[in-house]
Amino acid sequence: QLEDFSLLAPRIQGGERLYSESDADIAHACAQIARHGIDARHLRAFRTAAGRQSALLEQVVAPALRSRSLERRAAALEDLESLADVAQELAQLLLMRDLREVADR
């Protein structure tokens, strides 16, 4: 059940749940990870981590995103994208480091 993942944010229209393309990608990733025995309740950790990262990056660029200047807002969106890329790379590196430590025990 998609709703069990609690990672998806469907839009309700005419009583029907509509999922975005990113929700479909998330559901696919959840299904793949579920095949390894990780249930929906464990997936909340992924959502929480992503939410915390998102909130931190938002704080950094929020003032520029609220600017009346279109150029400043555009630059903030570029900064946000760059920050997101680096944050994702950092998270991946930290994860791999931790998993190597698990494997070396």
Image (spheres, helix red, strand yellow):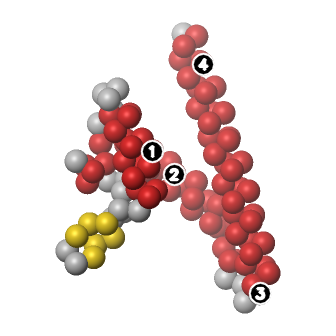
Q: Given contact means CB atoms under 8 Å apart, are the residues at marks 3 and 4 in contact?
A: no
The residue drawn where x is 51% and y is 51% is 50
Marks 1 and 4: CB-CB under 8 Å?
Answer: no
* Closer mark to the observer between disc 2 and disc 3: 3
Structural crowding at the residue carrying mark 1, measured as other residues with C-alpha within 10 Å and reported as few (<14), some (14–19) or many (≥20): few
What is the three-letter code of the residue carrying label 2? Ala
Q: Disc 3 on helix, strand or loop?
A: loop
Q: Does residue 101 appear left or right of residue 37 in this picture?
A: right
Of all residues, the one furthest to the top in this rendering is: 105
Instruction: Check disc 3 and give the amino acid type.
Output: Ser
Percent across and percent down for residue 4 are: 25, 49
Which residue in the structure is indicated by mark 3? 69
Q: Quadrant of the C terminus?
A: top right
- The three-letter amino acid code for the residue at tag 4 is Arg
Could you give the CA–CA distance between mark 4 and mark 2, rounded to whole angstroms? 22 Å
Front-most of residues 105 and 82: 82
* Comes first in the chain, label 1 or label 4: 1
Report, in whole angstroms, how far the alpha carbon at label 1 lies from the one at label 4: 20 Å
| Residues packed near mark 3 inside 10 Å, few (<14), some (14 to 19) or many (20 plus) | few
Q: In the rendered image, which residue does mark 2 sit on?
A: 50
Residue appearing at x 66%, y 73% in the figure:
62
Residue ID for mark 4: 100
